[in-house]
Amino acid sequence: MCGICGIIDLRQPASREAGIRGMMRAMKHRGPDDEGVFHEGRVNLGFVRLSIIDLSAAGHQPMISADGRFVLIFNGEIYNYIELRAELSAGGVEFRTRNDAEVLLAAYQEWGEECLNRFNGMWAFVIYDRVGKRIFAARDRYGVKPFYYLRTKDAFAFASEIPPLLPLLGRKPSPDNQSIFDYLVFNRSDQTERTFFAEVRKLQHGHSLSIEWPEDNQQEADVRIKKWYDLRSNLREPFRNPGEFRELLSSAVGLRLRSDVPVGVCLSGGLDSSSIVSILLKDYEKKDLSTFSAVYEKGQFGDETEYINEYKPFLKNMFFTTPSAETLYADLSTFVTVHAEPIPSTSPYAQFKVMELAKGKVVVTLDGQGADEELAGYHYFFGYFFKDLFKQMRLGKLSYEMFYYLINHHSFYGLKTFLYFLLSEKSKTRLRVDEKGYLNREFVEKHKSCNSIAGNLYNSGSLHDALLDHFEYKLEHLLKWEDRNSMWFSLEARVPFLDYRLVEKTLATQGDLIIKNGMTKHLLRESMKGILSEKIRMRRDKVGFDTPQDEWFTKPNWRNLISEILNSRSFTGRGIVNPTEAIALYQSHISGNTNASKEIWKWIHLELWHREFIDS
């Protein structure tokens, strides 16, 4: 796990070492153990290393192939590197190290771009072909590891994070108002190649990039991007029973134990992370396992203590942190800087504190990210499921599932989302905009028709399509937040549920094994019988790493901050939020008439982001 960066001159070679060194310093938290640079002609590469596999100096990057032709910088892990190494060795390849980076480089030499289909892991890497005068970069299937880039008149620059790129502009960056609209209206980001910076883009998950230039070095280089992985085209044979799912999930967890440093688990108390812990205890006998959890006062929203404590008889190394209004207030400036883009809730802050807790105790963490998108864990998936049954005219099954949904959850939310998903694309957007009565009308009119969420994410025709669309358009922002939170504390986060073998089989499985009898994640729940505590296995609610932010924003110091923001000339002058409406909504929140905490947080983070990255 590391940080990579580079500047490729598109016209004429230039001196770039100072720029590369500055980019490396800006993300040294991603790689405190080692660093390296490479310069040749148009190519300038930088690398900072967090040592995970083969801690020796042999893992130094940029890594040059034995024949001197290829240069690699790589962020991530190839979990099946041992198997690939054996296969390559059988074909005559000789290895000098024990690390996965050398296996990746050898695989590219042996199989070219087809090597991507053989990797089980998470990655963003760049390979420079010194003979062919070509750069090849690729990102993993689902976007676990980041890759940002910007293009100026003379150069193409990339990095694992956005802030290292901004000084290369030579001026203030500009906000991407379409991203801001999607963030405020739909609570979403990262569904396209856009970022919150108009000048910065990200290489999409499952995409690769190539840059080529002629031998004479006199012509402009050619930059091309293509999609190398499409989930819909790679669905496997579906699971036939929960036992098959259980076996493959255990394999995915086992692969992610490959490490030369300590491994722990971020334990929320929910079904997903608890399943990982139970598998580690039963299948891998990890009695010395360390877990890290965020807890609150009993009865506070987000407190999972009663579920986390189910593991107290089995684990000795359980660590806890308690995020609070005071800690968030103290961490606010750092948190805004760490993420470099606005976040629509404070849930990632709880994860931030969990990663802070884990630092110094482990170097690798496992958690349950991706399971909700894979197994319909969010309650609005019932809306897609009901819509699916309705379109098929399976009205008896629809009535049955609606009945059990109401019995299990005592909520009409699933029925409301069913009706919402039946609306037209324009109506979906209009309804969400109308809910946000605080938005400036001119801002809305300019950006409402360009959003991709109402059509691509909320217009899925079936539960199966909805799950696939969530992998395409929704999952990545969660992975981005986890990457920022973990890497700020020099930790590597691994996500077993996103093992591509598990994803491709699960998303080929029929809906009745995903949602059944008014319960989500049926396949996972059944597979964990006898392994996971029944109290957790049959939980009906969903919390995860959440926070009691509604209470937090009524505290005196937060009242002062929010009042300052809503009444500031900068907030008012952006033309995004109507300050009068925002102030009225905040007053309603303080009085207890409504819970507007999600909107309040979005205003706070958006304004502080502007001040930090756009105004200054």
Image (tube, rainbow, N blue to C red):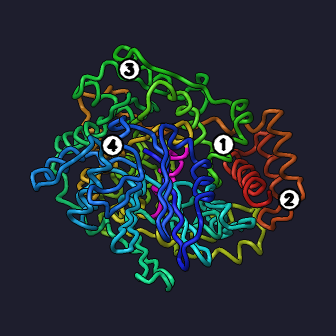
| Count of marks overlaid on the render | 4
User: What amino acid does circle 4 point to?
Assistant: Pro
Residue 335, labelled with which disc? 1
> Mark 2 sits on what residue?
570
User: What amino acid does circle 2 point to?
Assistant: Ser
Q: Quadrant of the C terminus?
A: bottom right
Position of 25 compared to 49: left or right? right
User: What amino acid does circle 1 point to?
Assistant: Phe
> Mark 3 sits on what residue?
311
Camera-near label (3 vs 1) is 1
Contact, CB < 8 Å: mark 3 with mark 2?
no
Binning the other alpha carbons within 10 Å of mark 1 as few (below 14), some (14 to 19) or many (20 upward) gives some
Binning the other alpha carbons within 10 Å of mark 4 as few (below 14), some (14 to 19) or many (20 upward) gives many
The span from disc 3 to disc 1 (Cα, nearest Å) is 31 Å
Secondary structure category for the residue under label 2: helix
The span from disc 4 to disc 1 (Cα, nearest Å) is 26 Å
Q: Residue at x 59, y 54 (%)?
A: 23
